Amino acid sequence: MNFESVFPFQVFILPPQDFTAFLGWLIMAGVLGILLKRFWEPVHIRQKRSWLIYAVLAVLSVLFTIFGSIKLGASSAIPLPNLNNEAYSPRLLLFFMLPFQLAAGLLGVAPAFIIGLISGVCLAFLETHNIFTIIEISGMAMVFAFCVRQNYRSRFARFVRIPVVAASIAGVLLIPLYILNQLFSINGQLAVRIDFALSQSWQILSIRMIELLIAAFFSTILFLLKQKIWFKPQKLVPSPMERSIAQKFIFFAVPTLILVIFVLLINIWRVAGNAAEDMIESNMRGTAEITVESLPYFLEAGQNLLLTLSDVNLVREDDLQIILSEKIRSVPFYRQLYVFDADRNPIDGYPERDIEQLRLTNDEFNAIDLALKGVTLQTYTSPPWLEKETAQISFIASIKDENQVPVGVLLGRTDLNTNPFTQPAIEALDAAAEDGGQGIILDENNLILFHTKGSPDLLMTPYAGDIPEEASFYTAYSPLGAPELVYYQPMLGKPWAVVLTVPAHQSQELALEIATPLMILLFVLTGLVAIVIQFSLRSVMNTVKGLSHQAALIAQGNLDTVMPVTRVDEFGQLAYAFEQMRLRLKDRISELKSLLIASQGVAAHLEIEAAVKPLLESALPADGYIARLVLDKSVFSEQLNRPFVSIGIGEQDSRYEELDHQLFELAKNQTIVPVSNFNRFKRLSSPQGLTPPGSLLSVPLYYENEYFGVIWIGYKQPKNFTESDVQFLSTLAGQAALAAGNAKLYMNAELGRERFEAVLNSTPEPVMVFDEFDRLFLINPAAKHLTGLVRLATTGAFIDDIIENKDLLTLLKSPTMDRDTSRDIELSNNRVYYTTVSPVNTMDRLVGKVCILRDITHFKELDTLKSDIVATVSHDLRSPLTLMRGYATMLQMVGELNEQQKNYVGKIVTGVDNMSKLVNNLLDLGRIEAGIGLNIEPIYPGVIVEQVLTQLQPQANQKKININFHSSLPAALKIELDPALIQQAIYNLIENGIKYTAIGGNVDIYLRLKPDHQILFEVHDTGIGISPIDLPRLFDKFYRSGRREAYKERGTGLGLAIVKSITERHNGKVWVESKLGRGSVFYMSLPTIRT
């Protein structure tokens, strides 16, 4: 095995040998064209790079055919039938399959087919010289391209897209195609073609498979490493197997059937070939045995006859020729006799007397010498006599006298053709050669003594075939290269042998005769199996389609079509199950319709009588005659003397109330009461004067563990109740219990509403209730008649159409999700109202808001008067307080004070400071509430917080409190505020946190930007917290908590009130969240832009 290119090579291609081959080639080409059209996909080769790849692959497909092959050697040569001395030496082309595989993955099916076509043409012209090679390679390229580019979504399809798997599939499909091509492309009889296709194709197939897998190895590496350039389907679709059961069955059944047929064909041919060879071997063995059995007798007879003729008188007779002629005529064994004297001189002979005409061979001369030396008898072979058709057999006997001294030599010649003793062997060999075979007799030197062809040129020439050591039957090739069957039989007692040859096509034709009936039977059975499968599959598919159609009808809501059940197998059982499902579903839908009607009745009416009427109509079955509902009196708003109320349909009689009462009491302690036979049920007594029902079924009414009554159905005849009957009535009972519960809730709600309206109407303060869409829900008379409050008091009207006062409208439309909002509002009647808007939340969802107005005009007047007095007093107190503090601090300058005196002076100074702080706060609060204009300017919020922290840091250090400032505002963000007032508000909030936080605590300040573009200041402390009782009034003036912990830190009670006033002056909000004992969080929200 060596690497080489194909050069030097002969460029030619053999056309189809006959019309059958030509027709087969056309059919295959047509099938290939149909498949190409079927697998065709649009070719998108628009980029120069793609065209360059296309061109490079086309060139490589030619180069890889010429270069880079491995010659497998003469031992792998495959002799071609009917071509004398012609044998195909296969080559392994390492990269021959790579170009079309790369084209399939990079370009498409059509480019891969074109590249495969180029490769096939090159291989056909340069290597195989077979026109069918073009079909093989291009077809393999197309199948491979389809496998790697199919867009099916199944797991098997994803596996097939791997190049090495696709190559394996293409290789498997190549096997029948290649065998069929060989059947058409080989010249000769049909038997020869079949034998070559089935017996001699496997080596070439193996080479093609190896080439395919070598290329697939490199393609798979590219597929795994460069998936972006390798084709990947964008949209996956269901495969035919997923769309149809029949397609799935055919996909698995047809390849399996073809594989079985293929294996059976190969085995049939192999068995028929073995049988044919056994028959031929048996015939050849018989002929050879006849030949080898007759030849020893011939030699022995010749030797004995020559000994008899070798009389001593022969050398003494004068008329020797006459005597020899008489001896030949008396026993016609020898064709020539000749006598030599003791000096090797010829005496005389018959029919040739001249020694020159006898033309003795060297072996005969040597034999004469040996005979004169005492060798009694010898046998030799010699060339044929004068164009005879067989070699001569020379018998040489020594003529001895009475003393056994050689006195002469007798030479006898005969040939195998004319000797009567060899006629059976010759006739047997001639019979074996009638059908193109050959019969050969070899001597001890493997020289041909007899050949059935009768050519003198072959006689006495060495036999060119193999010579085994024992009798053997084997296959060999003639000198012309034709395969033939050879039987070699050595002769017993003589180193001669018989060789019989028969052309191999005789065995193949005989094998074809043997295999033809089996093949016909196989194809007939295959056709019958295919027909049976087709009809069986059609029957199965019809059944499946019927079931699918029935399922579609059921899915569409058509439950009236009956599913015929005509089978008893699994499909029949499935059809029966479908029919039962249809019937049950129809009954269930009928029940659901009844339940729907009952549910609609329950949902449409809040009055119990109207709600349960359709429910009772649904509960009354066709075989029932009465349906009654017994309800507890709590369901009804009227005051009743009896504990229950009965509602019924069907046969009505007041005397059934006795039975209603019994069932009403019985159902309290028993869930379901099925009475199959009323006369046998002792726990119920029959109503007097009435025929009792034959059977009845009752179910109690429970809703949220509350007993509301019982529903029962009466039947005239006894009846065994099914689970479906009980379940249906139980469902209706649930609906009835729901209706009773709703009626009771509605009654209670109506009572509560009436009470609420009475309270609301009697309230002197204006009250308005709005829903989550700002529509008026409730309004009391005080609000309706308040001048300047509302312009429209229609329930359901929007808030913009109702509220007349703009300040109140702004307050109502402001977000109030998580807290109450209050504000003093002055109406057009010059009255001031303290307005509170409270959100109404349900499950963390705003469902409305309540607005309450309280007239505080009188309190405002008192507050104004108080403020004036406080301001006057505060202003008048500033000078005395200053003098008091000055003199108190100057006491130390007069003289030395003792500790008690210092303590008293310190308390005086502290009291004066507290009083001064209170006076300042009062004056500040007065100025703020007086509405003095704000000094608005853009500022950085973080700068103000840092300034406040700088002022309060010493106070925090005294209590070892950690102050942390966190800001998530953009660095360039400015807000329009009054810096002094806002700084005071922030100061009060942070100071408040430090004041009520224990030693070692934490105070955290957060600065955030809210989604509504407002700045949010947050002050978190870990102090004592605020009681829920104190939260509503925490921002009121002079308000202090009554808790003991709060008194430890004394204050003026004005700090948070000032914060609130400053915040509201800036159109902001301030609120607090706190948990007692865990700390508080104060929030101050301010707009970024002053409006």
Image (cartoon, rainbow, N blue to C red):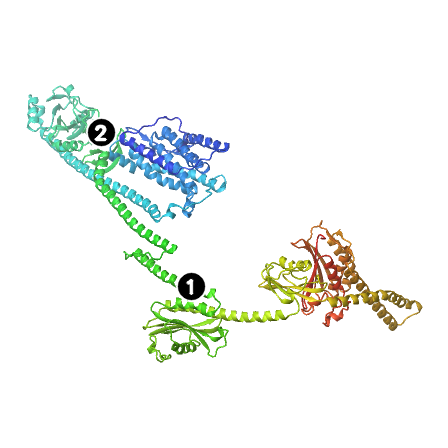
Please tell me in which quadrant of the rendered image residue 614 appears. bottom left
Q: Nearer the viewer, residue 211 or 979?
A: 979
- Name which residue type carries label 2: Leu
- Name which residue type carries label 1: Ile
- Return the residue at label 1: 597
Question: In the displayed structure, would residue 309 be above or below residue 594?
Answer: above
The answer, for residue 1018, to whether it is visible in the render is no
Question: In the displayed structure, would residue 373 be above or below residue 767?
Answer: above
Please tell me in which quadrant of the rendered image residue 317 appears. top left
Image location (x, y in percent) of residue 801: 62, 57
The answer, for residue 966, to whether it is visible in the render is yes
Image location (x, y in percent) of residue 744: 50, 71
Q: Nearer the viewer, residue 256 or 1073?
A: 1073
Q: How many marks?
A: 2
- Return the residue at label 2: 447
Give how far apart the Cα atoms at labels 1 and 2 are. 115 Å
Q: Is residue 538 left or right of residue 737?
A: left
Image location (x, y in percent) of residue 367: 18, 27
